[in-house]
Image (cartoon, helix red, strand yellow):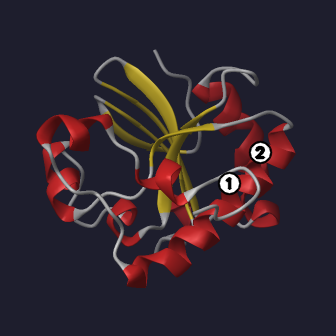
Amino acid sequence: MQLTEHFSLAELQASTKAAQLRIDNAAPPEVLPRLRKLADLLERVRTYLDTPISVTSGYRCPALNKAVGGVTSSDHMLGMAADIVAPGYGTPYDIAKALAPQVSVLGIGQIILEGVRGKQWVHISTRVPDKPANRVITITDAGAQLGIQALV
């Protein structure tokens, strides 16, 4: 099912880890409206960056979220978050730096530059966190910091 011009339901629930562990990661019907809203957000991000973006992690059922070490309150389980990269634009740091000033304009609820366990990506959510300071953060193996910080 195509959710938007460039993003499909299959793409937003695809998971190598789920396939590896034989976990059914199909989103339940009540999650589909939130995935459509997420796909709309991803379209705005794609347009703003003027380059294709790849979703490395979208919807996660609770079993998959646990298997990948996701937090129990993960927006991924609600169909409200995607981890992305856009090699045609630059590094995840470049992407996060470009998007951070546009959070409100693009309708991004939260953006997190993540650099953990030797991998880097940008987490984008439609949900606005309770604490406004947590809308734009960086998470590394050393912990969380406010704003977009250079990854070492």
Mark on residue 89?
none
Crowd around label 1: few <14 · some 14–19 · many ≥20 (10 Å)? many
Residue 8 in the image: x percent, y percent?
59, 55
Residue 127 appears in the rendering? no
For image coordinates 75% across by 50% down, the residue present is 45
Crowd around label 2: few <14 · some 14–19 · many ≥20 (10 Å)? some
Callout 2: SS: helix
User: Foreground residue, 95 or 60?
Assistant: 60
| Image-based side of 16 in relation to 106, left or right | left
The residue type indicated by label 1 comes to Leu
User: Foreground residue, 128 or 78?
Assistant: 78
Residue under pointer 2:
46
State the residue lying farthest toward the bottom.
30
Residue 105 in the image: x percent, y percent?
82, 64
Q: Quadrant of residue 27?
A: bottom left
Quarter occupied by the N terminus: bottom right
| Image-based side of 42 in relation to 46, left or right | left
Residue 85 appears in the rendering? yes
Residue under pointer 1:
42
| In this view, 1 is above or below 139 | below
In this rendering, the count of numbered labels is 2
For image coordinates 40% across by 46% down, the residue present is 14
Q: Are marks 2 and 1 in contact (CB under 8 Å)?
A: yes
Callout 1: SS: helix
The residue type indicated by label 2 comes to Arg
